[in-house]
Amino acid sequence: MSISHAVHTDSYRPLDRSAPVFVAGRSGLVGSALWRLLKAEGFTSLLGPGSTDLDLRNRSAVFEWFAKHQPHAVILAAARVGGIKANDTRPTEFISDNLLIQVNVLDAALRHGVERLLFLGSSCIYPKHADQPIREEALLTGPLERTNEAYAIAKIAGITQVRSVRRQHGLPWICAMPTNLYGPGDNFHPEHSHVLPSLMRRFHQARIEQAPRVVNWGSGTPRREFLHTDDLARACLVLLERYDSDSPINVGTGEDLTIRELSDMVASAVGYEGAIEWDPTQPDGTPRKVLDISKIAALGWTPLIKLPDGIAETYAWYESTGPGGARLPRQ
Ligand code: GFB
């Protein structure tokens, strides 16, 4: 696969704030952050049907919806997502649902001549043992992490489809690869969620129940990078208005920490003071995943939310509105 490295930093092509913009996945972690930002930025015709109104896996429904609403721009933030265990135990849904969603939305967008489109992937598309920090050029240079191979292959197919449309039809569609994300509105499911909300819920429950110990998964030694979804949303708008290349572009902080360090940070935000143990029978996944963000930095974007601040804000959200938080008795 040959990747063009052109980044047109000088061509600012603003989106029409009054034209219809479809945020696919509007109620998800990323989509809700995008929705907040685009509203604040003055977009007046946002489209974001919920999954009960429009199942993106249903091809004819997606085509009918595009014919009716004629979006000018599309941000494809809809996906089946989950943490390491969900990926590891339900690979069939991860590959099938994501391929269906992507192919339907991208095909319908092409049929209706959607001019501006941003497809969101994930840092797990890169090889398990890619050089760190991971540059965009690492795509398809080595084997993937086994636990999320199905999800990664689906996302790589999405990148390839977007690049095919660029090459064959000349539309300036683009792909962004966010690192591990977190923020208000995350999924806090005890088994299926990502590490940050999982730990938050576990520590919260342990504090309320005055449990003397908690057990986290794996060795705690893997290194990860965490980006707040409000920072990602700003990056998406910058990219839609300033980026035009067939290379996917990384969106992260460029800074990582061990899962043990993250665990201590979350425990401190939650006020949990008991013991923290680790279960080595649970998978660690990729040993390290931190993105090289020099491409997006050259476009003038930088993350603004420091991890401890973002964790505190997310915990405040969880305590007031979050799934387990709202239901649990307060001390
Ligand atoms: O966030 P996480 O599930 O995603 O796990 P990945 C990150 C690390 O945290 C792993 C450890 O080493 C886990 O073993 N961990 C410790 C825990 N305790 C827990 C816990 O209670 N819950 C969870 N979930 N992890 C996902 C991919 O990988 O990253 C997806 O599977 C996607 O495809 C996503 O790309 C961003 O970073 O390992």
Image: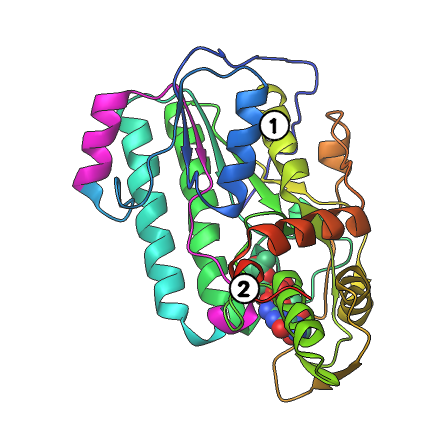
How far across and how far down the image is residue 156, in percent? Answer: 48, 51
Mark 1 nearby-residue class (10 Å; few <14, some 14–19, many ≥20): many
Amino acid beneath label 1: Leu
In this rendering, position of residue 90 left or right of residue 302 = left
Amino acid beneath label 2: Gly
Q: Which labelled disc corresponds to residue 200?
A: none
- Residue drawn at x 73%, y 53% is 311
From the viewer's perspective, is residue 181 above or below residue 4? below
Camera-side residue: 231 or 317? Answer: 317
Indicate whether residue 59 is drawn in magenta.
no
From the viewer's perspective, is residue 220 above or below residue 296? below
Q: How many marks?
A: 2
**Where in the image, quadrant-wise, is ligand 1 located?**
bottom right
The quarter holding residue 20 reads top left
Label 1 secondary element: helix
How far across and how far down the image is residue 221, in percent? Answer: 78, 75
Q: Can residue 22 be seen in this view?
A: yes
Residue at the bottom extreme of this rendering = 281
In this rendering, position of residue 331 left or right of residue 184 = right
Q: Is residue 291 visible?
A: no
Which residue is the site of mark 2? 324
- Which region is colored magenta? 60-86
The quarter holding residue 251 reads top right
In this rendering, position of residue 192 left or right of residue 318 = left
For discs 2 and 1, the disc positioned in front in the rendered view: 2
Query: Considering only order in the chain, which callout, 1 or 2, is on the residue closer to the N terminus?
Result: 1
- Residue drawn at x 25%, y 40% is 53
- Residue drawn at x 64%, y 37% is 230
Q: Distance between the residues labelled 2 and 1?
A: 35 Å
Which residue is the site of mark 1? 239
